[in-house]
Image: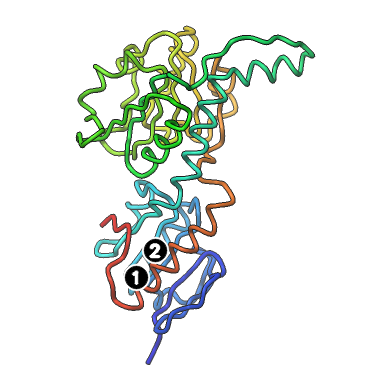
């Protein structure tokens, strides 16, 4: 009995289940096996060239992404092929970064680092997170993880999701909620509804001195509108994602006042790889057993 072929971008750290055989393949450069492979685990940050290889696999049944969002991958996945996300494996690391950025900005760490470089000793009172109202837009698995950590800092957390549920308000409440926010954290997926959501009208609702943090997708924010708000000194920002990404060398974002950039590293902690391995092991086992897959996008 032939075993079903699974392509991985890394060596499995677990016993391969019966009924499948796993090969470590650099997607896009493999010349053989295209006619046999049925399950592909995409490399983290797969390129367009790698993704186009999916269309040359006639027996392909499942594509497993390592990313939580699949909006960039989905157009390359052939019709009828199941697409699964990496939802859940990034929650803790992304929440860590979101809170780290919030603390960095609200405790004035960029200013203290500048003072250190200038050999100046200037203690001052900073905002902090305790008793501050933090609005987390996108209260799924990542947003909920962010909220849980913020509560440990005694912040008042307001969760916002597409639809209201117990303890979480709907997107329609944003015009009411935003003016009272000290910090706004974006954790939404990129969809037609969220693309360009943070525009001039959104930013105008924020009170002077508010902090905007984006650990979602760069295109959720209209960069030109954000730059105008930053240059006017109305708000500050901490961005793990940008539009375009990365910013060109001449982008005004690099020098924008009251703005900290990190290079899309929300999930990139040492916890990521073991959690990806655990997810892929479970998915491959489910595939071999003919059971329902997790994180099915379509």
Mark 1 or mark 2, which is nearer the start of the sequence? 2
Residue 237 screen position, x and y as percent: 49, 21
Residue, disc 1: 60
Residue lying at 34% horizontally and 72% vertically, measured from the top left: 286
* Secondary structure under the numbered disc 2 in the rendered image: helix
Residue lying at 32% horizontally and 42% vertically, measured from the top left: 140
Residue 115 screen position, x and y as percent: 72, 14
Q: Is residue 110 above or below residue 214?
A: above
97 sits left or right of 151 in the view: right
Q: Where residue 54 is drawn, which disc sits there?
A: 2
Q: Where residue 234 is drawn, which disc sits there?
A: none
Viewport quadrant of the N terminus: bottom left
Residue 23 screen position, x and y as percent: 51, 75
- Please tell me in which quadrant of the rendered image residue 3 appears: bottom left
Q: Are marks 2 and 1 in contact (CB under 8 Å)?
A: yes
Q: Label 2 crowding class (10 Å Cα cut-off): few <14, some 14-19, many 20+? A: many
Q: Nearer the viewer, residue 108 or 186?
A: 108
Viewport quadrant of the C terminus: bottom left
């Amino acid at each position: 009995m032939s075993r079903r072929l699974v392509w991985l971008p890394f060596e499995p750290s677990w016993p391969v289940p019966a009924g499948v055989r796993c090969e470590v393949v650099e997607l896009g450069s493999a010349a053989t096996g295209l006619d046999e492979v049925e399950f592909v685990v995409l490399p983290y940050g797969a390129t367009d060239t790698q993704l186009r290889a999916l269309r040359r696999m006639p027996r392909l049944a499942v594509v497993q992404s390592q990313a939580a969002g699949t909006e960039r991958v989905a157009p390359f996945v052939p019709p009828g092929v199941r697409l699964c996300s990496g939802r859940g494996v990034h929650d803790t690391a992304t929440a860590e970064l979101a809170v780290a950025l919030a603390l960095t900005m609200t405790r004035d760490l960029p200013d203290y680092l500048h003072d250190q470089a200038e050999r100046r000793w200037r203690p001052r009172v900073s905002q902090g997170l305790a008793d501050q109202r933090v609005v987390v837009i996108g209260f799924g698995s990542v947003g909920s993880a962010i909220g849980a950590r913020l509560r440990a800092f005694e912040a008042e957390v307001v969760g916002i999701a597409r639809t209201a549920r117990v303890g979480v308000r709907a997107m329609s409440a944003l015009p009411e909620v935003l003016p009272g926010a000290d910090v706004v954290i974006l954790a939404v997926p990129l969809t037609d509804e969220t693309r360009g959501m943070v525009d001039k009208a959104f930013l105008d609702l924020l009170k002077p001195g508010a902090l905007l943090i984006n650990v979602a997708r760069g295109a959720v924010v209209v960069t030109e509108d954000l730059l105008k708000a930053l240059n006017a000194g109305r708000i500050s920002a901490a961005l793990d994602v940008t539009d375009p990404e990365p910013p060109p060398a001449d982008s005004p974002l690099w020098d924008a006042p009251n703005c900290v950039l990190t290079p899309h590293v929300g999930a990139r902690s040492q916890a990521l790889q073991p959690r990806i391995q655990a997810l892929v092991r479970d998915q491959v086992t489910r595939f071999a057993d003919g059971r329902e897959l997790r994180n099915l996008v379509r």
